[in-house]
Amino acid sequence: MTAVVEIAGVTVRRGTSLLLDNVDLVVAEGERWVIIGPNGAGKTTLLKVLSTQMHPTAGIVEILGATLGAVDVFELRPRIGLASSALAEQVPYEEKVSDLVISASYWGGGASGTRTRTSVVRPTSCRCCRSTTWPTVRSGRSARANANGYRSPARS
């Protein structure tokens, strides 16, 4: 199988803090992985590297056949899917939930200042999310919007 992610010797340092130390990982096409560990173990840092939101201090990162540092990450990011509660901090305060869901296929932190394509998703049971802004959505409602409120159209 083709590797969709391949990292070798990845280290991330910020100041005197060592966030990741010599990490190797290969994820093949069709595999599903769960990253678990205690607070401070480097889970979020690893996901930031894998989603091209952070560059490592050392090591090689290949994502979808492109090497981080030799590719325009803004062209690569739309091909990467990521769901994380840590992303909520990056969403603009005035963002509508429906725009946020639509803009996820173009990840750039929300529709504000980014292009959107309304045909990416179609609203179903979460009508309240069309005009509701992100900060007013409680965690239960946001989970419902994520899980039930929007469904991607079938792809051929």
Image (cartoon, rainbow, N blue to C red):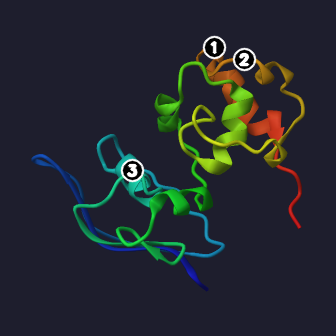
Give the SS element for disc 2.
Answer: loop
For label 3, the residue is 43
N-terminal-most mark, 2 or 3: 3
Give the SS element for disc 1.
Answer: helix
Give the SS element for disc 3.
Answer: helix
For label 2, the residue is 132
Q: Are marks 3 and 1 in contact (CB under 8 Å)?
A: no
Q: What's the distance in space between the residues labelled 2 and 1, CA to CA? A: 7 Å
For label 1, the residue is 136
Residue depicted at 86% across the width and 23% down the height: 127
Q: Quadrant of the C terminus?
A: bottom right
Residue depicted at 67% across the width and 50% down the height: 105
Q: Quadrant of residue 147?
A: top right
Residue mark closest to the camera, 2 vs 3: 2
Q: Is residue 103 above or below residue 137?
A: below
Q: Amino acid at mark 1?
A: Thr
N-terminal-most mark, 3 or 1: 3
Q: Residues within 10 Å of mark 1 (few under 14, many from 20)?
A: few
Residue depicted at 82% across the width and 44% down the height: 121
User: In the displayed structure, does residue 72 sit left or right of residue 98?
Assistant: left
Q: Position of residue 38 (x, y in %)?
A: 35, 44
**Nearest the camera: 26 or 58?**
58
Q: Position of residue 85 (x, y in %)?
A: 52, 36
Q: Are marks 2 and 1 in contact (CB under 8 Å)?
A: yes
